[in-house]
Amino acid sequence: MRKTLTLLALLLFYYLAAYSQTQKFTGKVLSKDGTPIPDASVRIEGAKTGTTTNAKGEFIITARPGTVILISAIAFTPERVTLTPDRPSYSIALSESSKFMDEVVVSAGGLKSRVKEQGYAATSIKATELTNTAPVDVTSSLSGKVPGLIISDAGGGVNQNYRVVLRGQRSLLGNNQALIVLDNVVVPNEILGNLNPDDIANIEVLNGASAVALYGSEASNGALIVTTKKGTKGVPQIRLANTSTFQEVSSYPKLQTEFGGGGNGYGINPDGTPVFSPIENQSYGPKFDGHMVNLGYPLENGDQLMVPYKANNDRKNFWNKGYTNQSDFSVSSGNDNSTLYLSGQYAQVTGEMPGDKYNRATLRLNGTRKVSNVVSTSYNLGWTQNRYDVTTQGADIYNNLLNIPANVPILMFKNWRTNEYANPNGFENPWYQNPYFEADNNREHVRNDYLIGNVQVDVNAAPGLNLTARVGMTTANVSALVYTGKFTYTAYAIKESGGSKSNIPGTVNPYSDYQTRLESDVYATYKKEISKFSFNLTGGWSIRQNNSAINSATVTGLVVPGLYNLSNSINQPTAYNDTYESRLAGLYGDFKVGFNNYLFLEATGRNDWVSILNPPHNSFFYPSVSLSFVASDAITALKEMRNLDYLKFRGSWSKVGQVNLTSDPNSITFGAYSLEPTYSQVNGYPFNGNAGYTVGNQIVKSGLLPEFTKGYEGGIDLSLFQSRVSGSITYYSTHTTNQTVPANVSLASGYSSYLLNSGEVSNQGIETKLSVIAYQNKNWTATVGGNYSHYNNKVISINPALPTLSIYTYGSGAGSYAVPGYQFPVIMGTDYQRDPQGHVIVNGTTGLPVVNQTLQVLGNSNVKDQLGLDLTLRWKNLTLYTLFEYRGGNKIFNNGGATYDWSGTSIRTVAYNRQRFIFPNSVIADPAHAGQYVKNTTAVIQNGNGNDGFWTDATENMGVTSNYVTSAAFWKLRQLSISYVVPASVIHSKAIKNITISAQGRNLFMWVPKSNIYTDPEYSDAGTTSNGIGLTNLQAPPSRYFGGTLSITF
Amino acid sequence: MKKISIFSLAAIALLSASSCKKFTNINSNPNSATTSTPEVILPQAIVYTAANASSFNDYGAEIGGFAANAGGYGGFGSAWTYDYGPNDFSGLWSITYDALNDFENVINITANDSTHVLYNGIARIMRAYNFEMLVDAYNNVPYSQALQGLSNMVTPKYDDAKTIYPELADQLDSAIAIVHKSESAANQAPITSANDPMFGGVAASWIKFANTIKLRLIVRASAVASFSNTTFDAAGFLTTDAIVNPGYAKISGQQNPSWNTWVQSYAGSNGNRAWMPCTYAFSYYNGAKLLDSNRGKVIYLSYPNTANNQLGVGTTSVVSAPATTNAWYSGSTTALGNTAGIMKGLNMGEPLVLAAEGYFLQAEAQLRGIITTSVTTDSLFNSGILASFKYLYLLPDDATLASYLNTPAKDFAQYQADNSGSYLVNWSLATTPAQQLEAIITQKYIAVNFINSQEGWNEYRRTGYPVSSSSTTDPTASFASTLSQSTRPDKLPTRILYPASEYSYNAANVPSGISPYTSLIFWAH
């Protein structure tokens, strides 16, 4: 701090000294095309005084006539101008520097830096790349484009949720998702999916912590710096667009189509086949033969539904074709003093699940205004509202579908109110509901409103010295109504189903919550050049305050059907409310020094004080250092190489602290109040005026510390052949220690979870990128690009007392775990007992495989290799763009697999045609040599059916995790678009500047290994916020999207 | 100007640093209590134990021949085969330890508190009760290092069950001493039924309960473990049922847990209908083995035509459980509740230990010379049967005998007359110690039917009574599943497995190689 102040004082001294002897000159700095250049440096040659241009490119300088001023700006070639006494005003045009390394990008804290100064990996994604497939959620369009970035759709639906992770997971149980920064303000991750993609000017992806250490303790996971559009000076630009997108199921679990409902439990026919049942959900009955059979029991009026006993395709056709319509408009304008950008978008989505609907409206107002010669202001204001009307039983409905034999004509059960066979009273299956009824009867209506805004004031306090103050605010308000309708069965239906059809009492649960995040930043930046050195110093502080509250009430047992209100009940509602508050204060400094415009050193430091840890552990300091060396500018031999545009070496080191008391970056708890044990009323308490409390189930280690991620990265950026070839390679290595681990522990300890600092995860990887303009002439351009990332995330240690750490597990114990020495995370579960060669050991008498109940590591679930390949082909006004993505090197556990086996609909269950079989690749104990095994050719599993046979056996089949673990590799055609810009000669209109027509598709095709008979391995049953990746269940089937856009610019 | 800049910037920096402490000191929890008192933890822990007792009954009923699968349901899996996995009945483990931790908390916060002596004593008694439930289900369990999470002991070692049992008996002795101390101690915090939903703070009742648990430990294990003190406090054993009732009501989470599971939810949804009476147990009522028409009528729906089944028989011929209620409910099917029997009503209390069990324990203890009382063994035996009648004839309030029934004594007499040739009912006919033991255990089996079924199952494993045939062809002779994969002669399992959570989080300590067919609880054979 002392150094900053000294320099500041020096500057003031010079400024004052020069003032008394001089005359005032004004000027305007423009690019060759007439656009003003803001922030250009105007410096008196040989002196240390100077100024910078304002937003309109204007400057005022006081100097002695005859003085030479040096005008320079990032990305432009500097110019010298002599000031003459008879000419008080100048217009100076700078030519753009050919090397895009001079390009200015936004980096941490809203500070700007040139690409050449960056000592770390960064990827800039432009607006056109974000919207060329017209997604509703911009997150999806980042997949496959950025090395080191993994975007995962957790499970389909009308508005997917994505998990955004840079450089693999580093925190065992804390938040691993990239920080989202919108217009320099840190926002909850959910905001990214609620932006209008057309409002985004640029997303700067900063992979490593050193790039973003200034953002504070949430930055250890890298950041996506999102900048929205600003108005531009000149003729106002108005854009209108409409997009229609269709959505359809792109892949479906492999199901058997040979056997219908029934099973041995209903008896065995004289020919040895299992008996058919008209009501059984398990498809372990006889083979389909096409003759007419009963479906369900006779109705009260004697009607009996009959259907052909053969497979149909209704289980897949149940899913609708979804449709999305998006309408956009935007206005951009500006003059010398202000700019304005206005936009609006409305998107309406109907989903694949019958009845599911979603819509979203967004408004944006961005502007800048120069208040005086030294003060300028800017503001960004965004409003988003989204509305869901969806079923709450998506997974259960999918489960029901997979429990319906293939001969059941599901589609005829759509009108359950009017069709007697579709009505719950008459529905064929007594145990599982008609999926259409279930979807209608279990719904949630959710309203989300987001207001995101910030205002900023910049004061050019003195030449080279800028003061900035900014206040940002994000509020999210949710109000929702979740309900299950009441249904009273007829006495006949209850009796005929043996009571399996049981009245549905109905439930209603309204809830609402809000969260507000306020952030205020004040900082001073001072720039100075001293001979060959350039200095850029920033010091500032930041405070953040988060508040939230949730209220929720539930009542079960409705009186009037169809009325969803807490008062409409025979019972008293139960309710709860919680409020949360957390604060963070940070003091930071950034010191940049450049030498000769080719060597740059940047050092940052920040100290944070957080409310959610106890003193003194709630104050922590973290530094970063980075170095960039532009060899192509520094070394004469390289400088003179004709085809080398630039060559940059870079390296950085950083240490960032993160308080990881919640894994959810959107969490409304902010991790507050996690340190003290709690007591709560449970088990029915309060009973009739008496209280009863239980001890909470978590133990917290006293003196809990933040997690620290320490690491370095190094890389090379280069550009060849006048930018026709550009590429980069980065290697990084980080170690995250002091992991904050709410570890599951033995229940015999009296507790279920233990929050402590323990464990270390290392992340290493390589990120490469190459883009080649393969062919270029007047009409044609062909660009191919690729990026490849390799990830190696390893658990070094956890805790001597915790040999393994569960991240997300199912009741069976199978799930996602951290295990020292293994990749992070791994899938653990049960497996069969195997001989040393890996053959399954079976019981020599029953032929049944022997299960090892001890959990085994069954494979890593983190992606190890990721490849993105893109091709852009332009011919005159026509552009074709494709993007493929591959991910692999990991496994997935399909927890839903057991359901398919249970129901007898999975393809696995017909592997032996439902006959007795010998377990494949099995061995039996060698009778001659104890402890040795011989190939099994004799021990046969007698009951090769389900119902009471092998396939539905929980111990020997369904409960064995390894049966459902498959490769998670995939190739996806992520994006395909063709767009055509209608030539002006065709339009014949002065008003219309541009018409673009495009057709586009997303996730059109997916290729997975044969072993994956289930679903999209990108899905995560643990949701977007859990680190327990690699688990899928009965999420909606994966979809493809395709549609068209028409846009007109006025 | 230079100085002003320096000073103002420095001042701001200092201010922000020094005010940080205040700025960030806002982490006190506005949502949950961070302290508590024995007055409110103890009652919850007792009610939690009662809910768990209902789960123990379910486990004992499913394995022990009291319940069998009903028609129309599948997925019985290991309930049919006995090929248990680590997830079967895992709730018994987690809930018992969770409840134990609440008692442990009461013991810790009252340890040096001279005003909550009875609270301390009760919590100790309940701790012993719960640990016994664990040992009887799992044999070796974490005991000496258990419940020490606050001292960072999260991977507790397993203690030999043979050493836990005598330790529990000693703990009960010291708890009884503490309860006695509370009776004379001054300045005691009041303890009412609000704080003690089992005995309303009556010290004498707690001592009887403690004595009964201690007797159970010694009766069960005296042959295989050595107890330091086999004498009992003069207060004697349970003469009334130990029943928990915090005021069960038709409110979410507040119904009697058994009723809630098996009959109907507070909102009117059906209870579990996948199970119904097992033919084996039912044959002790309908005359197939014994005739017990009065208790049969008061327990079962539509007795003697109650739907019943043999475990493992899963064909379509198996009838479903009753459509609107449950087979262990004998009252009106249109207005559920307010009836005598097992499922009395949503407001009935949940028994932890029946007085009947106390009498049968005394009878056996006397038979084996463990205790000597002033009453004869046959009188203890008869008191046990009569206590069973009494419990079953009570209405949901646990106090009023159903007026529409005869007196328990009269119907007990008829029971003896109806089975005048059976030494299982008439003590005088049991002439050998083996017959006497069989009579005691069989009557205990009948008394705990679907109330504390796990005790019937425990005693079967310990004594081999009531007899279960090695052939499953006669559903009244064997309660083993027809689909049993057990290698034992009786085709029954010996125990359940440790839960998966122990294999995940305490793998170094949890015993390996546990078999549901060959691994025995230490008192079993």
Image (cartoon, coloured by chain):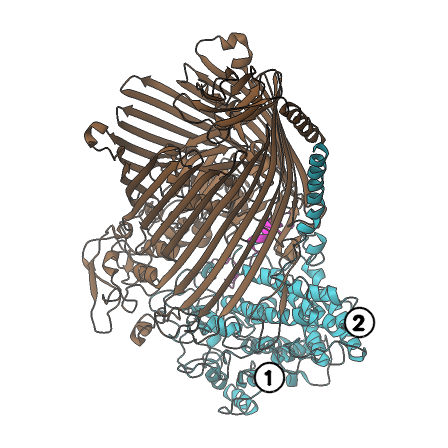
| Chain containing mark 2 | B
The percent position of residue B152, horizontal first and vertical second, equals 70, 52
Q: Chain A shown in which color?
A: brown
Q: Is residue A267 magenta?
A: no
| Chain containing mark 1 | B
**B364 in relation to A661, above or below:** below
Q: Are marks 1 and 2 in contact (CB under 8 Å)?
A: no
Please name the predominant secondary structure of the magenta segment in the image.
loop
- Front-most of residues A483 and A245: A245
What chain is colored cyan? B
Q: Which residues are magenta?
A: B485-513
Instruction: Find disc 2 in the rendering and name its residue.
Output: B114
Q: Residue at x 59, y 60 (%)?
A: B93
The percent position of residue B202, horizontal first and vertical second, equals 70, 80
Instruction: Find disc 1 in the rendering and name its residue.
Output: B387
Q: Is residue B501 magenta?
A: yes
The percent position of residue A156, horizontal first and vertical second, equals 38, 47
Question: For numbered disc 2, what is the local secondary structure?
Answer: loop
